[in-house]
Image (cartoon, rainbow, N blue to C red):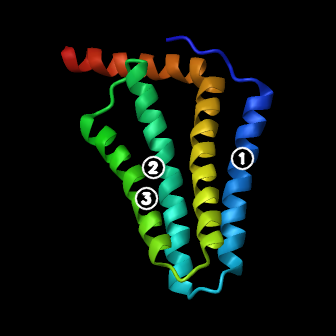
Amino acid sequence: MEHSKPSAAFVGASWFALLLGASAYLIGLWNAQMQLNEKGYYFTLLLYGLFAAVSVQKSVRDRMEGIPVTNIYYGLSWFAVISALLLLFIGLWNAGLALSEKGFYGMAYALSLFAAIAVQKSTRDSFGDESKSHGERRFFRRSAEVDN
């Protein structure tokens, strides 16, 4: 499957959205009147969610391009995204925050996850041809070695 390289505007907008969402979330967390363990919980959820979103995007794209992805990794990636979102929802639902603060954290989190997917996509599209051909050669070389 052939993908065109993303425009500079798309790449820039993706990175800007990621930095904006993550920075807003982290600045809000830094200034929040929460205990340190609560801040740690929400910080860990941001890291977990970002990693999970990138992992899902990569595994979905790999499958679309015929690159092998194990079912367990694919399933775990989706489980990670869903659990990160569920944990954030439960945490915010039970938090003693104003509704506007809960909305702020939810929107900053959603923007960060969406932007992380866009950044991963644009990065892969920008460097996909060179790394894909190298990766395919390495994969097929290993496959041929196993067959022999």
The residues tagged by marks 1 and 2 sit, at their Cα atoms, a distance apart of 17 Å
Q: Amino acid at mark 2?
A: Ala
Residue 144 against residue 7 in the figure, above or below? above
Q: Amino acid at mark 3?
A: Ala
- Most extreme residue toward the top is 2
Question: Which corner quadrant holds the C terminus?
Answer: top left
- Most extreme residue toward the left is 148
Tag nearer the camera, 1 or 2: 1
Instruction: Look at the numbered discs 3 and 2 and tell me whether their residues touch, using CB distance below 8 Å.
Output: yes
- Most extreme residue toward the front is 99
Circle 3 crowding by C-alpha within 10 Å: few under 14, some 14–19, many from 20 = many
Circle 1 crowding by C-alpha within 10 Å: few under 14, some 14–19, many from 20 = many
The residues tagged by marks 3 and 2 sit, at their Cα atoms, a distance apart of 8 Å
Image quadrant where residue 145 sits: top left
Q: According to the image, label 2 marks what residue? A: 52
Task: Give 62 or 88, whichever is nearer the viewer.
Answer: 88
Residue 59: x %, y % from top left: 41, 34
User: Left of 111 or right of it: where is 40?
Assistant: left
Quick one: SS at disc 3? helix
The numbered mark, 1 or 2, whose residue comes first in the sequence reads 1
Task: Give 73 or 107, whichever is nearer the viewer.
Answer: 107
The numbered mark, 3 or 1, whose residue comes first in the sequence reads 1
User: Left of 89 or right of it: where is 12?
Assistant: right
Q: According to the image, label 3 marks what residue? A: 84
Image quadrant where residue 104 sits: bottom right
Quick one: SS at disc 1? helix
